[in-house]
Image (tube, rainbow, N blue to C red):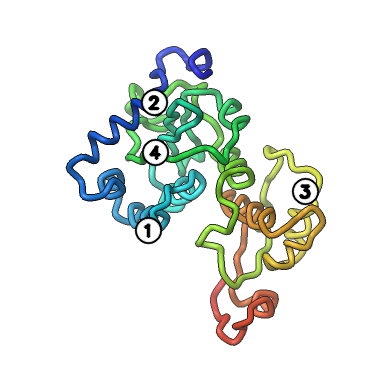
Amino acid sequence: MFEPTIPFGEPELMRVSTFRRYLDELDKDAATSSSSRLASLSPSLMADLMRFEQDGNASEAVEVLAACVRHARNVTVHVALADKVVPLTVFPQERLVHCPVDMSILLESRLTELRVMHIEPATLRPPGDSEAALVGAPESHFALGQLLWELALRGARDRLLPEIAGTAAYRLSPGLDFSALHLAGSLLAAVERLARQPTTLREMSDWPGFDRERAARLLNALYLQSGLIVSRAHPAALGDSWFSALGRGRE
């Protein structure tokens, strides 16, 4: 389904079965698959990613991309979509992602089925880099914010990311521009409400059109747009916890 959309000069997409054999070759001398697949990353990013694999579960795409953005590391994340593997090269500082297929194809797919297969330091360079031969085709670069937004709202993760979970009150960062995300309906109403007042996950779950899962997804999406203020000491957060006496933190 993807070959006609691949720009001239970009590599063809590998089949999942073929890519799995490639990973097996990488892992055959390693004690565990996760250690070998993450060993070439920076120690801080590797430690962050390992948190998600401690229970033996595969990392979800939104978790991996969130970690890459948080550590500002250029990383290529190979994800399985149907029977093909799509390499997503993330440039956090430029807020861009390189994808060899049109981003609309990726975003129109069932994002809950997007599976992370492999993570490695990026070989490609971002647009404007001095090594022009390593810069991908201009039409293969897309806004990272849009991908993060859709993965948060429609991907596999249905609970808060660890960085914003726990006893907290949330509000919107002032001046955040959402014009490219085309908000409407209950999502727009929720964002406008978060701009006016801090709230908790429990309170958001009772808003019109929301439940706990949708509230968590929206908060994740806002966090990944650098648009969320998380307060651990706000009275709303302390009042939302059974352990309010222990709810000390810092904003």
Kindly indicate whether the residue at mark 4 contacts the one at mark 2 (C-beta within 8 angstroms): no
Residue 176 is marked as none
Residue 23 screen position, x and y as percent: 29, 35
Q: Secondary structure at mark 4?
A: strand
Q: In the image, 212: left or right of 107?
A: right
Q: Quick one: which residue is furthest to the left in this view?
A: 29
Separation of disc 1 and disc 3 at Cα? Answer: 36 Å
What number is the disc on residue 117? 4
- The reply to whether the C-beta atoms of the residues labelled 3 and 4 are less than 8 Å apart is no
Circle 1: residue type: Gln
Q: Is residue 174 left or right of residue 86?
A: right
> Which secondary structure lies at badge 1?
loop
Q: Real-space Cα distance between discs 2 and 4?
A: 23 Å
What's the residue type where badge 2 is placed?
Val
Query: Could you tell me which quadrant the C terminus lies in?
Result: bottom right
Q: Earlier in the sequence, mark 2 or mark 4?
A: 4
Q: Which mark is residue 188?
A: 3
How far is the residue under mark 3 from the one under mark 4? 34 Å
Disc 3 residue type (three-letter): Leu
- Name the image quarter holding residue 146: top right
Which residue matches tag 1? 54
Q: Amino acid at mark 4?
A: Met
Q: Quadrant of residue 50?
A: bottom left
The mark lying in front, picked from 2 and 1, is 1
Place of residue 154 in the rendered image (x, y in percent of width and height, measured from the top left)? 62, 43
Q: Which mark is residue 135?
A: 2
N-terminal of the two: label 3 or label 2?
Answer: 2
In the rendering, at what x and y percent does residue 169 appear?
65, 69
